[in-house]
Amino acid sequence: MPTDPYTTSLHYDRRLYKQDIAGSIAHARMLARQGIISPQDAEAIIHGLEDIQDEIEDGLFPWKPELEDLHMNIEARLYEKIGEAAGRLHTARSRNDQVNVDVRLYTKEAIAGAIQRIRRLQEALLKVAQDNLETIVPGYTHMQRAQPVLLSHHYLAYFHMLQRDRERFQECLRRVDVLPLGSGALAGVPYPIDRKFVAAELGFSRISDNSMDTVADRDFIAEYLANAALCMAHLSRLAEEIVLWSSAEFDFLSLDDKYVTGSSIMPQKRNPDFAELARGKTGRVYGHLIGLLTVLKGLPLTYNRDLQEDKEGLFDTVDTLHATLDVFAGMIATAQFNKERMRQAAEESYVLATDLADYLVARGVPFREAHAFMARLVAYASTRRKPFRDLTLAEYHRFSSKFGQDVYQVTVEASVAARDVPGGTALPQVKKQLEQAQALLQQG
Ligand code: ARG
């Protein structure tokens, strides 16, 4: 029966050819070792598959969509090449455990690729922190200037988000790294197979426990997609901040020419398209996660053809995540930070209001009262468009008699230095954080 285009997966599962061939070679070796097929047949199968791999890589493989999927295409081609022995390869195997092994091998590689790229981006963030160890920038809450912080501290925040992403990928690898082959269509196979041998051949740490669960399971893809979605969320937050910070309104950083594009009609523009696209592409990755969860939710045991819908979203997520991580590593490494402007933004605003309230607390004023005095003082100063340092002591005294000449020593540097608690923004703490971050990168 010819395949209807509706059911064909060849146009995307072709991408799994290497994994499919590796899985088949390991399976053929095991069949021969166990005396299930002859050594001669195994030999012919393995050579045939190696030839096929070359054909595919040289662009010479005659793909036939009417054969439905990758697995059938390779098997049919193997017949053309070696004849009857080809028919013995599928002994003790089903496409249900075959496709599962392909996607697991693929996902393992995808995880390694994500981990390595996250590391590169973490290195770029660390470099920004090192180069800006003492650069002062306003820290924000509610998008309002809140308290001064070190830019190094700010960028290390992203380092930690990515550290968790990297750990999540590492942890999910444990559940991806399981051999499904040997589960057959659903119930296991009636041959004396050696699953552990196949696992070792393919580099899997262990074999699956329940054949029915195995052929029905796509949790490992959902986990990968969830981890990718969270990683994209982090990148998207950073992207949003880059868009803001590179605007004329902020002017905190400027992106390398490589990461901006001009407008076709407004010559002054340097649009942060890469950051915007990263923010936008986060949507499709979320979509793929929800898509797969939805595919899974109504499925009775065991394999159902719905499961074929797992692949396109996975592939697109891998491509999107890898490309986005690569872009960010380059974009962060080449961004120029406008230290003067950041400092000015901190100084001309009222980010020292908390510190001045703390100043009054140190002179015996209860914090709540000090807070109220400061709220009035900020209102007074801002209507006159005066930064704190331009207020006279007499003006300070209108709000509290506790202010003394040393109020002018409450500076952005002093504010940062005062937050000398673990995890705080004071320089000695940020230096410790940097060392920990370096150690985390060295750990792998
Ligand atoms: N193309 C299928 C998939 O991706 C392969 C497994 C097909 N199995 C089957 N019994 N039709 O899920």
Image (cartoon, rainbow, N blue to C red):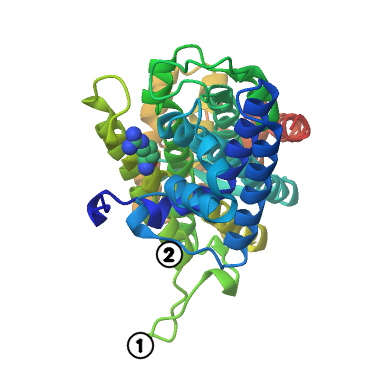
Give the structural element (helix, strand or loop) at label 2.
loop
Percent coordinates x, y for residue 141 in the rendering: 41, 39
Identity, as a three-letter code, of the amino acid under mark 1: Ile
**Mark 1 and mark 2: Cα distance apart in space:** 21 Å
Image quadrant assignment for residue 221: top left
Q: Is residue 236 visible?
A: no
Percent coordinates x, y for residue 268 in the rendering: 44, 83
Residue, far top: 209
User: Quarter for ligand 1?
Assistant: top left
Residue 111 vertical placement versus 257 (above, below) = above
Residue at point 62%, 48% (across, down) = 49
Residue 267 vertical placement versus 251 (above, below) = below
Q: 74 or 340: nearer the eye? A: 74
Give the side of residue 205 with respect to residue 179, left or right: right
Percent coordinates x, y for residue 275 in the rendering: 47, 59
Q: Which residue is mark 1?
A: 265
Residue at point 57%, 20% (across, down) = 362
Q: Quadrant of the C terminus?
A: top right
Q: Which residue is mark 2?
A: 249
Give the side of residue 376 with respect to residue 17, left or right: left
Q: 377 or 335: nearer the eye? A: 335
Identity, as a three-letter code, of the amino acid under mark 2: Glu
Whether disc 2's CB lies below 8 Å from ligand 1 is answered no
Residue 362 badge: none
The mark that comes first in sequence, 1 or 2, is 2
Q: 75 or 138: nearer the eye? A: 75
Percent coordinates x, y for residue 213 in the rendering: 39, 17
Residue, far front: 84
Residue at point 43%, 78% (across, down) = 269
